Image (cartoon, coloured by chain):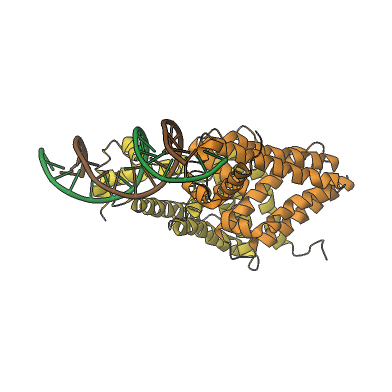
Chain colours: A orange, B yellow, C green, D brown
Amino acid sequence: MAASATREKIIVAADRLFYERGFDMTSFADVAEVVGISRGNFYYHFKSKDEILNAVMESRLKDRHQMLEGWIKEGQPAKQCVANFIHILLTNRKKIRAYGCPVGTLFTELSKLGHPGEESARHLFDLFRNWLRQRFMEMGQTKDADRLAMHILARSQGVATLANAYPDEQFLEAEVDQMLAWLDAVSDADIKPTQRSS
Amino acid sequence: MAASATREKIIVAADRLFYERGFDMTSFADVAEVVGISRGNFYYHFKSKDEILNAVMESRLKDRHQMLEGWIKEGQPAKQCVANFIHILLTNRKKIRAYGCPVGTLFTELSKLGHPGEESARHLFDLFRNWLRQRFMEMGQTKDADRLAMHILARSQGVATLANAYPDEQFLEAEVDQMLAWLDAVSDADIKPTQRSS
DNA sequence: GTCTATACCTGGATAGAC
DNA sequence: GTCTATCCAGGTATAGAC
């Protein structure tokens, strides 16, 4: 339970390699080399590869949770919080162009593997989804909050995938602008209840 | 070169398994079992696993090309063609919910593997991208044609990924509706050059 | 806690009989 | 064209010395 130094180093290294190369393609030898320990020593800290995956997922969940809650604790308004979320695509643009979205790509791989870790990968989606839904509710979109949350999630996933396929374009930046414009339209719709339709 | 019956069966089986389980996770034994031949017999038809991948990618490219060109040969107008493309998400909804997008997931995996087949996977994206760009140009969006094509591609990818993560929702259908509404807005923008903005 | 050595399995690939 | 037998590399996991 106690977070020993090497245990922590293993998690950090595995986290990075699972992102960059994928879970299945990352061998113990790869992680051991990065950490600077022997292959055998591994099993003192983790009894199996699945245990490492669990630890990585736990670490990611905690990390993303703290990031999202941090914005709220700073007192940022709901719309700004969602804008921050969208802005992640720009903050991590280099990694996203090289490896796609860490959440989406890992989920997809585990799903195809039929690996039980698919569940924890989905939990990460849940974390973002629920948090976004809350923000949209605070923006007054009580009825469509979940739909809007899913929409933003899907847009982010798609942008990350195509930025990975076409890393040499300004596509990513342009799509983020459009997503922020969409956010403006959504928040305006709350302020102006008089719509053109119906 | 000649398309023998078993060779063709191998390609079909590999195509399906690469989609359902991923390229790396699909072994010769898996494909052999589906086709009904022995492991050894494999190498009479393909000298390596990479050769099978190449054949699968070639087959997919040809298949998708024929689908896209088919709509044009039928004389369907540009906007309807794009709508057909969006509609693929509904036509294949069952498979998409189970395995995501065949193009996107395979690209992502090959990209992470550092596999040379990443190139042919990108060619599939190119096929859709160029075809969509042509359609938007025919719709009069000469300047933004490529941006619009990329936007539709990204939306499709994101919807497929999240439909895979949340297969039990009507999310997919709702997003397709929104994409079709977006297409309407884009084609209207061409007809009505007088906009509200600026 | 960390190491070396090793068992065991899976999967890609080859050889050669039929 | 298809089979069986076999080799070899790489990866997970274990045993036991230090």
* On screen, residue B190 above or below A112: below
Residue located at (57% from left, 61% from top): A166
- Count the marks: 0
Q: Percent position (x, y) of residue A72?
A: 83, 44
Residue located at (53% from left, 45% from top): B101
Q: Is residue B51 rendered to the left or right of residue A133?
A: left
Q: Quadrant of residue C18?
A: top left
Residue located at (80% from left, 39% from top): A134
Examine the rendering and report whether any part of residue A27 can be seen: no
Query: As rendered, which of B91 and B108 lies closer to the eye?
Result: B108
Examine the rendering and report whether any part of residue A80 can be seen: yes
Q: Quadrant of the C terminus of chain B?
A: bottom right
Q: Quadrant of residue A143?
A: top right
Q: Percent position (x, y) of residue B43?
A: 26, 48
Q: Percent position (x, y) of residue A12?
A: 61, 47
In the rendered image, the residue lying farthest to the bottom is B143
* On screen, residue A56 above or below B50: above
Q: Percent position (x, y) of residue B6?
A: 27, 43
Query: As rendered, which of B195 and A149 lies closer to the eye?
Result: A149
Q: Quadrant of the N terminus of chain B?
A: bottom left
Q: Is residue D15 rendered to the left or right of residue A175?
A: left
Q: Is residue A171 rendered to the left or right of residue B101?
A: right
